[in-house]
């Protein structure tokens, strides 16, 4: 990737020391089982971001002025396990530097690493998964770090809430918490699902969004499109409420599979990322200090900790 800054922003807003936000690109597509190409997602997202207006009309803000540091892409691809470890270490490193950490994939297996890092650093973490697929297999194709296993670990170690689900294997019913799962066919006829989902969240929330959660009519460029998905404004309505009522500690977006003849999906992903930042920093001036409130003492008790203290500027 040749992008020097996120969205082409000026250098003064892109330095690590002064930026509140870190964006980690993870161009990984090692375990996809249908359409390949998610490894090209981060570059397509960044290119679309450079063509996006940076004034958000809804919030009346220019959130990029909070500072967005574009980290080096994580290119580890020797194995799914090594990739997850690399994502985990990079994510945790930036959390410990008091940044609002975000990641853009790549396929959904990258989220095993991001979720693991956030769970080590924040007490009573809720993982809000917005997705077409349950991704609850304990192991798939010989690996626990497959995209089909993206939130299995979260189901065991966090308060997992699943939204938009409309495709799964029967084995996943043995793991799924049906009280905290919002199926797309139910959401279509129940206008209380947003309040219900938010009521089940703890204070600290990490959001993982698989872009196939959206209906393919507005997001066709993803590896495994499923009919009957979310639309733009209902998704923003839900996200705006989550950011307003909870402490969103970070998020990732995955599974953009770009198509040279269809660029609207790239732009949707770019706008979604920027919208989420706009909601997070809605009431915070660019000059205000930022505290991500991570719990340094928790890392010593988490069995998944493999954190490397070395800085990467």
Image: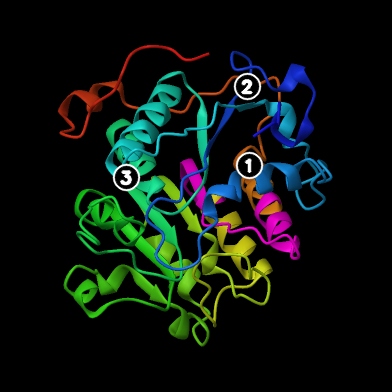
184 inside magenta stretch: no
| Residue position for label 2 | 19
The residue at the point 51 percent across, 53 percent down is 254
Q: Position of residue 67 (x, y in %)?
A: 67, 25
Q: Position of residue 128 (x, y in %)?
A: 41, 56
Pointers 1 and 3 in contact (C-beta within 8 Å): no
Q: CA distance from mark 1 to mark 3?
A: 29 Å
| Residue position for label 1 | 277
Q: CA distance from mark 1 to mark 2?
A: 13 Å
Give the quarter of the image for residue 17: top right
Tag 3, which secondary structure? helix
The residue at the point 69 percent across, 22 percent down is 14
Q: Looking at the image, is 88 positioned above or below residue 166? A: above
Closer-to-camera residue (125/192): 125
The stretch of residues the image draws in magenta is 244-270
Q: Indicate which label's residue lies in the foreground, 1 or 3.
A: 3
């Amino acid at each position: 990737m040749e992008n020097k800054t996120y969205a082409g922003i000026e250098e003064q807003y892109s330095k690590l020391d002064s930026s509140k936000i870190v964006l980690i690109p993870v161009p990984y597509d090692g375990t996809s089982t249908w359409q390949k190409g998610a490894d090209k997602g981060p570059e397509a997202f960044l290119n679309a971001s450079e063509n996006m207006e940076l004034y958000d009309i809804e919030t009346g803000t220019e959130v990029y002025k909070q500072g967005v540091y574009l980290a080096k892409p994580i290119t580890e691809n020797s194995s799914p396990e090594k990739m997850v470890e690399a994502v985990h270490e990079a994510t945790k490193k930036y959390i410990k530097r008091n940044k609002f950490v975000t990641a853009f994939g790549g396929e959904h297996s990258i989220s095993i690493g991001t979720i693991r890092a956030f769970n080590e650093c924040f007490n009573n973490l809720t993982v809000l998964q917005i997705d077409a697929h349950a991704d609850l297999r304990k192991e798939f194709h010989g690996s626990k770090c497959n995209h089909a296993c993206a939130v299995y670990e979260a189901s065991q170690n966090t308060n997992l809430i699943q939204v938009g689900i409309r495709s799964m294997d029967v084995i996943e019913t043995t793991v799924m918490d049906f009280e905290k799962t919002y199926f797309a066919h139910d959401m279509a006829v129940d206008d209380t699902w947003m309040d219900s989902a938010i009521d089940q969240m703890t204070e600290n929330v990490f959001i993982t969004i698989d872009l196939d959660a959206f209906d393919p009519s507005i997001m066709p460029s993803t590896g495994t499109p499923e009919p009957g998905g979310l639309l733009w404004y209902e998704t923003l309505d839900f996200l705006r409420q989550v950011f307003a009522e909870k402490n969103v500690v970070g998020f990732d977006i995955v599974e953009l599979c770009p198509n040279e003849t269809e660029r609207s999906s790239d732009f949707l992903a770019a706008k979604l990322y920027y919208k989420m930042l706009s909601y997070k920093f809605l009431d915070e001036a660019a000059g205000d200090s930022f505290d991500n409130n991570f719990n340094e003492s928790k890392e010593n008790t988490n069995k998944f900790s493999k954190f490397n203290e070395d800085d990467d500027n």
